[in-house]
Amino acid sequence: MSKSRNVREALSILIAMLLVLGSFSSFAYAENITFRLAKEDLKEVAAAKIMPEVKDDMEKQDIVEVLVYLKDQTDTEKVAETARNALSMRMTPYNVKLGVRRAVVEALRDKAERTQYNLLKYLEKEKEKGNVEEYQSYNIVNMVYVKGKREVIQHISNMTEVGKIYKNKVHQMDWNMDLNSSGNIDYQSNDNLEWNIERINADKVWDLGFDGTGVVVASLDTGVDWTHRALKEKWRGYDPETGEVNPEGNWFDPVYRYPLPRDPNRLVDNGRGTYIMGVMV
C-alpha cells in the first residue's frame, strides 16, 4: 500500500513537472514568434522609407546620393503666429516682422540640431571609416544630404527619427525655346502665352512692334555669367559679328574686380544674378 502510494506521488510529480516545462516551452516559443514578427515589421517599415529610385541605385552601385528627410518638421506658420502674437503688443510692425523672421529661423535651426544629432553622429563615424564620402545638414527642410555606401543608407532607414530617404536628383532646365532667324526668341510662334505675359498685356505691346529691341537694362546682383547662351549675344559689351568684347561702361565689379562679367558664387547661390538677368532680357 505504501509502495503504491509512493508510485502515485512520483507519477503526480513527474506529470506536474512535464506540464510546467511544457508551459515554459510554449511561452518561449510564443515569445520567439512575437519577436520574429516584430523584427519583420521593423524591416518592412525601414524598407518603406527608401524610395524606389534609391533602391534601384542601391542595387546597381555601391555609392549612392540621398536626401534623408526627418519625420519631425518645423511648423513655421505656427511658430510665426506665436511670435507675432507675443511681439505685436510691444513692438512696431517693422520690428515685429524682424522678430517673427528671427523666431522662425531659430526654430528651424533648433529642430534640425535636436533631431539630426544621432544621425550626424553616426555619419561622422562612418565617414572616418571611409563608408561615407560626404554629408550636409539642412534646416529649412529638416533634411540631411548623404553620399555613402548602400549599407549606410540601409542602416539609416532603421532610425526611428527618419521619415523618408529620397534620391538626390539633378533637375535640368527645359531649353525648348522657339527662335527666329536672328536667334532671338520668337514671341509670335507660341499661341500659349504665359499667364503673367497676358496679365500685363505685354503681348499687345509686341503686336504694336515694341519688343524690347534697343532697350538697355542693368542689374546689381551676385554677378552675371556673360557666356551663358541666353545672354551672350544680348550683352552690350559683346559684338556677335566680330566676337570682340568691350567691358568698358558695360560691366563694373567693385567686389571681386573681375574684368569681365562673372557670377563667382554659383555653387553657393546657384547663379542668382545670372538668373535675374535672364528674366530681365
Image (cartoon, rainbow, N blue to C red):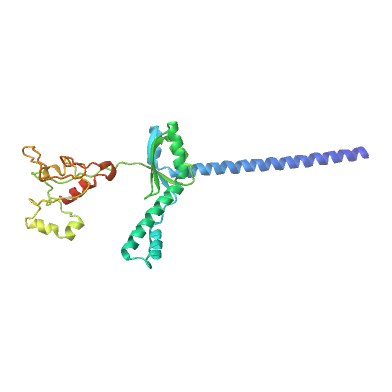
Apparent side of residue 83 relative to residue 171 in the rendered image (left or right): right
Decide which of 97, 67 is in the foreground and name it. Answer: 97
Q: How many marks?
A: 0
Apparent side of residue 45 relative to residue 103 in the rendered image (left or right): right
Residue furthest right in the image: 1
Which residue corresponds to the image point at 64% horizontal and 40% vertical from the top-left? 29
Q: Quadrant of the N terminus?
A: top right
Decide which of 71, 248 is in the foreground and name it. Answer: 248
Which residue corresponds to the image point at 40% horizontal and 32% vertical from the top-left? 62
Q: In the rendered image of this protein, does residue 82 appear above or below residue 178?
A: below
Q: Position of residue 236 (x, y in %)?
A: 10, 45
Residue 10: quadrant of the picture: top right
Q: Position of residue 168 (x, y in %)?
A: 35, 41
Q: Is residue 199 visible?
A: yes
Which residue corresponds to the image point at 31% horizontal and 63% vertical from the top-left? 94
Q: Position of residue 144 (x, y in %)?
A: 40, 43
Decide which of 247, 232 is in the foreground and name it. Answer: 247
Which residue corresponds to the image point at 51% horizontal and 43% vertical from the top-left? 42
Q: In the rendered image of this protein, does residue 211 appear above or below residue 241?
A: below
Q: Is residue 56 visible?
A: no
Q: Position of residue 124 (x, y in %)?
A: 44, 37
Residue 172: quadrant of the picture: top left
Residue furthest bottom in the image: 89
Decide which of 45, 92 is in the foreground and name it. Answer: 92
